[in-house]
Amino acid sequence: MGNNVLIFAEQMGGKFRSVAYEAICQGKKMAQGLGGKAIAVAIGGGVEAVAKDLGQYGADKVIVVDNAKLKDFTVDAYGKAFSEVVSKNDPAVVLLAATFQGKDLGGYASAALGAPLSSDCTEWASQDGGIQVKRPIYAGKAYVTVKFNSQPAVISLRPKVFLPDAPDASKSAEVEKIDLALSDDDFRSVVKEIITKTAGKIDVTEADIIVSGGRGLKGPEGFVVLEELAGLLGAAVGASRTVVDEGWRSHSDQIGQTGKVVSPKLYIACGISGAIQHLAGMRTSKCIVAINKDPEAPIFSTADYGIVGDLFKVVPALTAEIKKTIG
């Protein structure tokens, strides 16, 4: 079997997302441990022009499937393209980011190739000539260590857990373009329209800092205090499921078991009790600060720092102090 690592380089709108760089940097390290090469796979419309830049993050080679029909992600078409590339290159490991795209594509590739899959991994190590991973189970209440007995092993990494190395502009990658015949049958779902977020709004999955609110905000107007703090910190604003269910924030802001999984450098939880479903989506954050008037709130058992108090007094005071600090 092979010893290379094949990495899906996720893009949107012809631009690679930060999770692509995270995966490539980890894929390069895995490949070095296996004695192989890191091969990135870029799928989309108009991605060939920027493909070689992936070499700056460690890709030895980039395989490009560039087709106007692949401008927007659909699991059937992307799955067919990706699975064909994987089967022709016989890698030891197939690596993706555990995003919505990565989870869909990882499951498709696993089924198509009859390969084992371990999703949303937070740690990995070289072990006995292979790769061993650690991932959360039972909504993050426990972790399991997985060792693969067959190849290729399909692995997805939790975003923001593994930070990318700084790009090396002196490096570039060999680019190989392949043509793939696509029929209408390969598009069982078709993207008709993409409604973009408000300009300048930071996606919670890519934010280094998140200020998140729960039922303690009392209503959608309560998020004004969080928006001001987030603006000063260059942070994204997140929300608990309860808030989203009430219609106070959009589902794109939801963090938790049924929302998005995040791992920012700093997570500030305001008025969030800390139900296990919410903790499942943010407990791997590097530093957690909890603000809640209930000293018995479960969130304090997970937080690195806790403030017991009324968030409508604490957050404005915190915002005022930050304004003084930054001048």
Image (tube, rainbow, N blue to C red):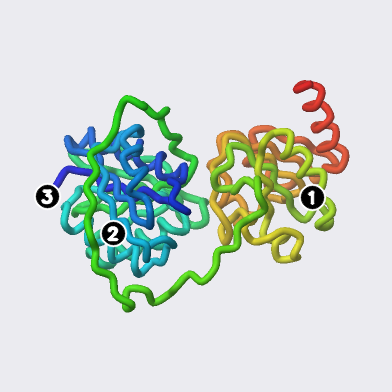
- The residue at which mark 1 appears reads as 223
Q: Quadrant of residue 229?
A: top right
Report the residue at 58% width, 46% height from top.
282
Inspect the image, locate mark 2, and give the three-letter code of the amino acid beneath it. Answer: Phe
Q: Nearer the viewer, mark 2 or mark 3?
A: 2
Report the residue at 40% width, 56% height from top.
102
Residue at the right extreme of this rendering: 313
Q: Residues within 10 Å of mark 3 (few under 14, many from 20)?
A: few
In space, the residues marked 2 and 3 are separated at their CA atoms by: 19 Å
- The residue at which mark 2 appears reads as 82
Q: Give residue 1's mark.
A: 3
Nearest the eye: 14 or 230: 14
In space, the residues marked 2 and 1 are separated at their CA atoms by: 41 Å
Inspect the image, locate mark 1, and give the three-letter code of the amino acid beneath it. Answer: Phe
Residue at the left extreme of this rendering: 1
Q: Nearer the viewer, mark 1 or mark 3?
A: 1
In space, the residues marked 1 and 3 are separated at their CA atoms by: 54 Å
